[in-house]
Every structure is written in structure tokens, then in C-alpha cells.
Amino acid sequence: MTIQRIGIERATVFYGQNTKRSLRRPPASAPEAVQRRFRELLRAEGIEDAKQLSQERTPLRRDREFRASLPVQPAVPDTSRYAITGAAATYDNLSEDFGNWRERILPGAFAPALNNRAADTIANVEHRNDLILGRRSADTLKLLDSPTGLEVLIELANTSTARDTFLSVQRGDLGKMSFAFGGKIEEEWTIENGIDVRVLVSIGSLFDVSIVSDPAYSQTHCEIAERSAARGHLNRRRLDALLFERRHAAHRRLRRAEILCQAG
């Protein structure tokens, strides 16, 4: 078993060559019982201290010889004609197992963050701020709180980062999304099928939406689209979301009440 540290709150544990499990430290707001069960899981994996995660890496194979040559670069179109569209989060779906706990986002949870225009949001790759694809304040990133989740439209520039990402998404090497959040968070904790579940009711700040290889929510997705077609599609989705909200606001409030009642 080897352990690879990713970011600050997450590690991936590898078993053999093909099987892996992603572990994420519960937030500080999690109940003590959740924190305790996560520590027990780390000990069961042979990790006595979370600091140990940053010191172990997947070892280089020593039983192979490696050869490499200059790669043939495929032709890349002018990416400023294109956009990346998708869903950075989906509502009412369980996340992956973070280590004896999971997460669920209630419909409308992103509304406070999206209504806070003073707080900027960027689009990037693997949550890296040196790989920026768009920014909300520059109107190159557009976000929509739709009935099914947080929809994204990133208008690409003709940069090396955009071209590399364009090819990776077009080939299918990258096809999922994630998001980074904080600020004032309203949450509840419940138990579903014997596992602790953090229910995100309201999110105060949305720092980024990101194209990633290992998402927390497997239902997320992203695709390449012509920019003009993507804009038209997003405008239609905005109208759909407005009509849905008017017709089903009562249903969404009832659904929230059901989950919060379970948590209570």
C-alpha cells in the first residue's frame, strides 16, 4: 500500500496497482463521532498521523527500463472559438466515500455564493491557480444555479493552458469537475445506510470550479462546445431554471425540510 498526498485535506490510498480509495479529512465542523471514526479508519490503513500523508509518494518502478522521445504535437485549433460546458456539482446526490463519511448538496445551496457578486470565482484545472481558464469578474466564466446542479460555461482563451485542457477534455482524459468553497456554510449531519452524511444547505463563498481527474461527485461532467452554441444553450437553461423555480419552489422547500428533519 502506498499513499499519495493531494492538496491539504485529501489523500489517495493505493492497494496494489489498480485499486485506490480517496480519503478526505472531515471539516472542523463535523461532529466528534465523525472525526473519531475517520481517525480510526486512518489507523486501520496504517496511517498513525495525518502528517504522514504528505511524506509518502507512489514509488517509481525499478523493474522497467524507460525510453522517451519528443512527442508529436497534434494540431490544435484556435481555442478562443470554443468553450467548456458542464456541471461542477450536482444536487441531491451522494459524494464518493471520503473515509466513513459522505456529502450531499441540497438544491439551491449555491444561491448565496452566486448572489455575492463582490466575491470572485475562477475556473481552473485540478484546483491550481496557475492553470486558470476563466474568471467570473471577466465574464469568461458563467455560472448557473439550475434545478439539477451548478452549471458552468468557460469561454476559452487561445493560451497554452486552454489548448492543453481543450485536448484533454476532447480526448476524454479529463471529463469531470469539482468546486472549492467556504465562507458562511449552513450544514446538517445525518446518517444514511449506516454512514455519516454531511448535508450542505447553504454555501457562502465559491472560490473556484475546476476540471479534475478525480472528482468528489462522480455525476459531474464537462464537454467541449462551440462558444456561440454554448452561450445560446446557457441562456435557454437560465430561462428553464427560472420557470422551474417558479413552478417547483414549494417542492424544493419540502425536499429540504425532509432532509433536515432526518438530520434532526
Image: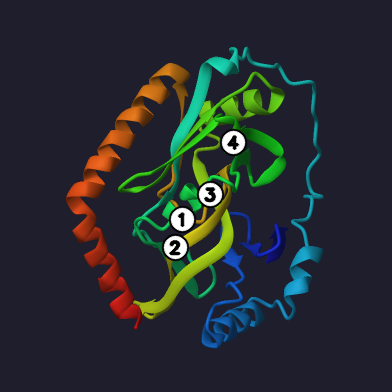
Q: Residue 137 shows which numbered tag?
A: 4
Q: Earlier in the sequence, mark 1 or mark 3?
A: 1
The residue at which mark 1 appears reads as 112
Q: Are marks 1 and 2 in contact (CB under 8 Å)?
A: yes
Q: Can residue 197 be seen in this view?
A: no
Q: Earlier in the sequence, mark 1 or mark 2?
A: 1
- Hey, what amino acid is under mark 3? Ser
Q: Quadrant of residue 95?
A: bottom left
Label 1: element kind: helix
The residue under the point 22% across, 41% down is: 243
Q: Which of marks 2 and 4 is nearer the N terminus?
A: 4
- Hey, what amino acid is under mark 1? Pro
Q: Which of marks 3 and 2 is nearer the N terminus?
A: 3
Query: Residue 83: where, in percent of width, then height?
Result: 50, 25
Disc 4 vs disc 3: which is toward the camera? Answer: 4
The residue under the point 28% across, 34% down is: 239
Give the CA separation, mark 4 to mark 1: 17 Å
Label 3: element kind: strand
The residue at which mark 3 appears reads as 178
Q: Which of 157 and 178 is in front in this view?
A: 157
Q: In which quarter of the image is residue 192?
A: bottom left
Q: Nearer the viewer, residue 86 or 232?
A: 232
The residue at which mark 2 appears reads as 202
Q: Earlier in the sequence, mark 4 or mark 1?
A: 1
Q: Do the residues labelled 1 and 3 touch (CB within 8 Å)?
A: no
- Hey, what amino acid is under mark 4? Ser
